[in-house]
Amino acid sequence: MELSYRGVRYNREPLSLEVSEGELLTGKYRGQQYHRQFPRHIPVLKEKPTLKYRGVAYKSCPIIQTEATLQTQLAAITASANKVQSKSRSSVVPTATSTHLDNLRQNLERRLQVAKERGDEQLVRLLEEESKQLAL
């Protein structure tokens, strides 16, 4: 394929890469489902030259993902998320519930104190009824 960049012409041969459609659904656009495509085999890449930055040698390397590596990563992420969620839910729910009830009690006591200072008997009765309903 002949290309041109800023007036300089050059030829580029497209990479021939066989791809297979993955089983994982990537998304849906305008009613059409589409899947991610993965290479059937990982192509052999040319050795890249060693680069240097401030005297430190390094190589830049592209990351090629196949469907198998993506599925193993997804399974590992799901497993770790489930493990964290089950641990955190069991310890957080009781403390969150008790904290919530403590906050309700403090808020109700503060509102009751303000109503008594104002001398609003109707509001005091309503707050005492609220306290009985919440069983605080």
Image (spheres, rainbow, N blue to C red):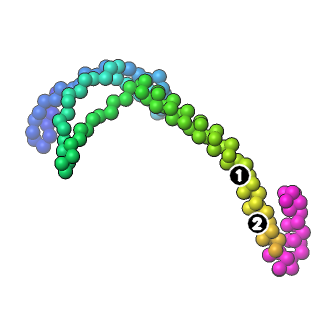
Query: In the rendered image, which quarter contains the C terminus?
Result: bottom right
| Nearer the camera: disc 1 or disc 2 | 1
Which quarter of the picture shows residue 102? bottom right
Q: Which residue is mark 2?
A: 107
Say the numbered circle drawn on residue 95: 1
- Magenta region: 114-136
Instruction: State the count of labels.
Output: 2
User: Is residue 131 shown left or right of residue 24?
Assistant: right
Residue 98, how many percent across, how many down?
Answer: 75, 54
Dominant secondary structure of the residues highlighted in magenta in the image: helix
Query: From this viewpoint, is residue 34 visible?
Result: no
**Residue type at tag 2:** Asn
Is 52 drawn above or below residue 27 in the view shown? below
Residue 4, how many percent across, how many down?
Answer: 14, 37
Q: CA distance from mark 1 to mark 2?
A: 18 Å
**Residue type at tag 1:** Thr
